[in-house]
Amino acid sequence: MPEADVSKKEKNFHTDVPQKNELFFLKGSNNYDWGMKNRLARIFSPASGRTVMLAFDHGYFQGPTTGLERVDLSILPLAPYADALMLTRGILRSIIPPSTPRAVVMRASGGPSILKELSNEQIAVDMEDAVRMNVSAVAVQVFIGGEHETQSVHNLTRLVDAGMRVGIPVLGVTAVGKDMVRDAKYIRLAVRICAELGAAFVKTYYVEQDFDSVTSSCPVPIVIAGGKKLPELDALTMAYNALSAGASGVDMGRNIFQSDAPVAMLQAVRNVVHEGMKPREAFELYSKFKNSVKK
Ligand code: 5RP
């Protein structure tokens, strides 16, 4: 039995203070339910509105990618510096300690390997299992213009429906096929389709020309993929330019874990994303961290 309220102190209802009714900080996300917003706020920092996601899901179609031969050795030391980990459920259960405070964005589509037609993906994780793993979002590849375009869009919409039932947001990942031109016109089309069909945020590639038209015509946040390994200064410049053109963060893989000093690189990227540090300054920071690790 709870004790009766016997306090002699006068009650204060603060009748002159209206209760705050704040808008949710993330673009296009205000009308979601509490659980969905809470999950998005684990991925995107409410302070900066941005995210640094560390992508190491590459094995789902290309096996032990360079730098990911031993995820336990290469990725676990990086995890403390990322806001979210983008991975497969196999790696989550076999390698990632359940005590991690990091948000998990789980790859939920797959099927073909690099030896086959990559767009022929299906849903690869049941939403019930995503709930069991307490993920903050699921990710699905969408192949606009690809051979199995409709099937991949259907994977997205089925995951959005399943995610809405339990409050799990879906990340639409736009894949650019080998024969497609990677320009703003194509990326605008692909990310807008993902957003229109219910993706809560979209991952795409940065293009130098008109990337601001991609972000402004997409009603939900965009995070950029790192793509192939670049020299560190170029990767930091790409991140900076993408953010300046309206991106809400990065979801970088090879440019982090294939760097000569992955922890230093991730810290430099964090500074660009969350503090707005200029690329040259971030590169100096990278070099400093890299040298201090060597000593
Ligand atoms: C494929 C993917 C990835 O497997 C991965 O997340 C890409 O990251 P990066 O390009 O930075 O290595 O999304 O499209």
Image (tube, rainbow, N blue to C red):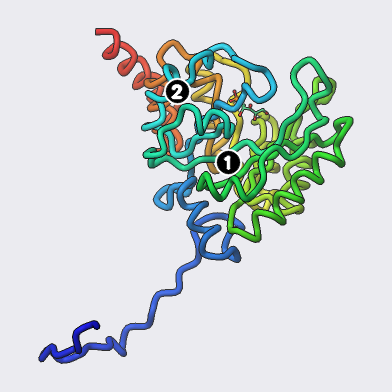
Residue for point 83% across, 23% down: 117
Which residue of the protein is positioned furthest toward the top in this rendering? 295
Determine contact: label 2, label 1, CB under 8 Å: no
Q: Is residue 83 above or below residue 55?
A: below
Q: Nearer the viewer, residue 68 or 285?
A: 68
Q: Residue at x 55, y 19 (%)?
A: 254
Disc 2 and disc 1: Cα gap in Å?
25 Å
Quadrant of the snapshot with the N terminus: bottom left
Q: In the picture, which quadrant includes the C terminus?
A: top left
Locate residue 286 relative to residue 126 in the image: left or right: left
Q: Quadrant of residue 174?
A: top right
Dot 2 lies on which element? loop
Query: Where 3 sits versus 273, above or below?
Result: below
Give how far across and how far down residue 184 sits, in percent. 74, 35
* Amino acid type shown at disc 1: Ala
Dot 1 corresponds to which residue? 247
Left or right position of 217 against 168: right
Instruction: Count neighbours of disc 1 (C-alpha within 10 A) and say few if under 14, some if 14 to 19, many if 20 or more.
Output: many
Q: Position of residue 233 (x, y in %)?
A: 48, 18
Relative to 73, say whether 241 is above or below.
below
Q: Amino acid at mark 2?
A: Ile
Percent coordinates x, y for residue 110 in the rendering = 72, 31
| Residue 4, image x, y percentages | 20, 89
User: What residue is rendered at 49% in x and 45% in y?
Assistant: 43
Q: Mark 1 CB in 8 Å range of ligand 1?
A: no
What residue would you read off at disc 2? 75
Which picture quadrant has residue 260? top left
Quarter of the image where ligand 1 sits: top right
Query: Which comes before the other along the chain, label 2 or label 1?
Result: 2
The residue that appears at 87% across and 41% down in the rendered structure is 150
For label 2, count other residues whose C-alpha is less than 10 Å away and answer few (under 14), some (14-19) or many (20+). Answer: many
Relative to 5, is 51 on the left or the right?
right
